[in-house]
Image: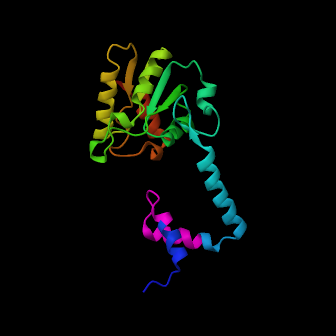
Amino acid sequence: MNIEPASLEALIGEFSSLPGIGHKTARRLAYHVLSKSESDVERFSTNLLNAKNKVHPCPRCYAFTDEDLCPVCKARQGAKSICVVEKSSDIIPFERSGIYKGTYFVLGGVISPLDGIGPEHLHLPDLVQRIKDENIEELILALGSSPEADSTALMLDRMLAGVSVKRTRLARGIPMGSDLEFVDEVTMLRAFEGRVSL
């Protein structure tokens, strides 16, 4: 017999739908929300809606921003290197560690046929065009260390045939299958400094 009200069950279901949140954690979060004041919950919901309505991909690099261009694209126009990542949150460890002073490009994922993600679902053509238009000198692939990332790197390498740009990948100091957003600064620094040519 379910003793929780339907509206509470619905809230638990919403939290459960978030990545990395199991049913127990979702229930704990839902009960925590119920313990907050109405003004706290209103502020929380307002911030959710504001983020959803105001945050959008940067038209130049596809990182999330709420401005016309993201702060990195604004501050580093004219940079001659691009660091390619899967998702916007992968930029954070680079910026937090201060090891990289170029610009970024968010692919929007990696090629994964099992998940129905092909090259046409990523921003690969935009990246190639940007490399040509801006005369980029170095392309740094920071896609993690999975077979899908390797396939994406190979596809990009083929698309750049004949384009004069140095291509490097992060060194293999990053554990297999890990997300970049969870990598500590020291590991990121070593992987970045030990990057190798493709």
Inspect the magenta stretch and tell me whether residue 26 lies in it: yes
Q: Main secondary structure of the magenta part?
A: helix
Which residue is located at x 51 percent, y 81 percent? 4
Q: Position of residue 32 (x, y in %)?
A: 59, 71
In the image shown, does 139 or 118 lie closer to the viewer?
A: 118
Which residue is located at x 59 percent, y 30 percent? 72
Would you say residue 137 is visible in this rendering?
Answer: no
Which residue is located at x 46 percent, y 40 percent? 87
In the image shown, does 44 or 82 lie closer to the viewer?
A: 44
Quadrant housing the N terminus: bottom left
Q: Position of residue 185 (x, y in %)?
A: 50, 40
Chain part drawn in magenta: 14-32
Inspect the magenta stretch and tell me whether residue 136 lies in it: no
Q: Position of residue 192 (x, y in %)?
A: 44, 31
Question: In this image, 46 relative to 198: left or right?
Answer: right
Specify the quadrant of the image occupied by residue 55.
top right
Question: In this image, 83 relative to 78: left or right?
Answer: left
Q: Is residue 95 above or below residue 27?
A: above
Specify the quadrant of the image occupied by residue 154.
top left
